Amino acid sequence: MALFVSALIIGVFLGTIYGLMAFGMVASYRISKVVNLGQAGVAALGATVYYWMTAQWGAPVIVSLIAAILVAALVGGFMGWVNLLMADWPKGFVMIFTLCVTLLLFAYVDHILPPT
């Protein structure tokens, strides 16, 4: 029973995260009419900031969580703003641009995290 309860709690949290990311993609598409593939990179950067602050610097969890949300919000907001500036560009090019930004964020995160 304990295994079921822990799996249920983890499932609810993961489902919430996936739902919020899907909502962000839908909202981004409705605003700019471009599929923004940068959501995953922004989420990975926020998770890395959280990990780095808690595990490496020893910051309290709430401070790390707030900092991770702020960093992800700033990077995501900047990407959204750039997306709106590129509104007149071909949609395929803008989508490839967001994919490239995601890959750059993943590379940066991979560079920051220690090897396992």
Image (tube, rainbow, N blue to C red):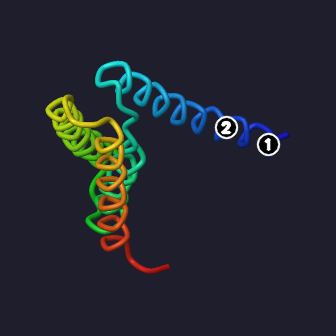
Which mark is on residue 2?
Answer: 1
Give the image quarter of residue 26: top left
Which mark is on residue 11?
Answer: 2
Residue ID at (63%, 32%): 12
Label 1 sits on what residue type? Ala
72 left or right of 27 in image: left
Q: Quadrant of the N terminus?
A: top right
73 left or right of 21 in image: left
Residue ID at (35%, 31%): 34
Residue ID at (40%, 34%): 35
Q: CA distance from mark 1 to mark 2?
A: 14 Å
Residue 74 in percent (x, y) is at 19, 40
Residue 94 in percent (x, y) is at 29, 41
Q: Are marks 1 and 2 in contact (CB under 8 Å)?
A: no
Residue ID at (23%, 34%): 80
Task: State which mark lies toward you, 1 or 2.
Answer: 2
Label 2 sits on what residue type? Gly
Q: Spot the residue most to the front.
A: 90
